[in-house]
Amino acid sequence: MDKRSIVLQDEYQIRFESNAQYRDSVLKILCQDFYSRYINKESVLLDLGAGWGEFTRNIKARKKYAMDLNPDCGHRVHGYAEFIQQDCATVWPLQDESLDVVFTSNFLEHLPNKTAVDSTLSEALRCLKKGGLMICVGPNIRYLPGAYWDYWDHYVPITDKSMVEALNLSGFSVKETVARFLPYTMSSGYNPPLLAVKAYLSLRFVWPLFGKQFFIVAQKP
């Protein structure tokens, strides 16, 4: 196991072990009440930067792949998805136009530089079918100018507008942009009741008050 994989294992244990069950419950709600609007049950899907596999386990799709360097991801998505352990900025072991959806959440900011982000988006474009979707969720540094850097492995500062530009430059057509979607993080602080999470998703008018993450949907032309 290389050093990066070991570091990722340690980071996830420190940040997420204490509330892993809560995170899984929140992702179950997000998948059922929101993400499923964009992802057909018959889709072939890749969870990019799958982490501990909360999205992978809870989203419904015909075929699922989970990509991450953290070997723990493979154990956590076993039986739910095919695990791909690799650097996402290198060539993916998938055929051209073989995916319907690439989903990524709170991941691209962890890549070492913008070149790696560009390479990752290029691979996503190659592997998506025509009309396929790239769904990006992530912390919006526009609303987190200081707290964004509280995580040692945040390298690339991203706003909703810079994410849109990166997607357009990579060849995508952006279809939907929400600058303020979810609150910032579940790795520390107060965890609201699950009923409050469900209510939040249905009350879109409150998102600008609490949302600090962007939600962007782009399409392969």
Image: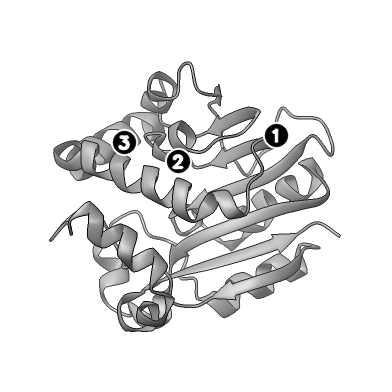
| Image-based side of 92 in relation to 151, left or right | right
Residue at image mark 1? 42
**Marks 1 and 3, how far apart at CA:** 35 Å
Which residue lies at the image location 64% right of the left edge and 63% below the top edge?
217
Asked if the residue at tag 2 contacts the one at tag 1, i.e. Cβ–Cβ closer than 8 Å, the answer is: no
Return the disc, 1 or 3, that comes first in the chain's sequence: 3
User: Residue 118 got which mark?
Assistant: none
- How crowded is the residue under tag 3: few (<14 C-alpha within 10 Å), some, or many (20+)? few
Q: Position of residue 108 (x, y in %)?
A: 51, 56
Asked if the residue at tag 3 contacts the one at tag 1, i.e. Cβ–Cβ closer than 8 Å, the answer is: no
Which element carries disc 3, helix, strand or loop? helix
In terms of image quadrants, where is residue 97?
top right
Residue at image mark 2? 55
Return the disc, 1 or 2, that comes first in the chain's sequence: 1
Q: Which amino acid type is shown beneath numbered disc 1?
A: Glu
**Marks 1 and 2, how far apart at CA:** 16 Å
Which element carries disc 2, helix, strand or loop? helix
Q: Which amino acid type is shown beneath numbered disc 2?
A: Phe
Residue at image mark 3? 7
Camera sees residue 69: no
- How crowded is the residue under tag 1: few (<14 C-alpha within 10 Å), some, or many (20+)? few
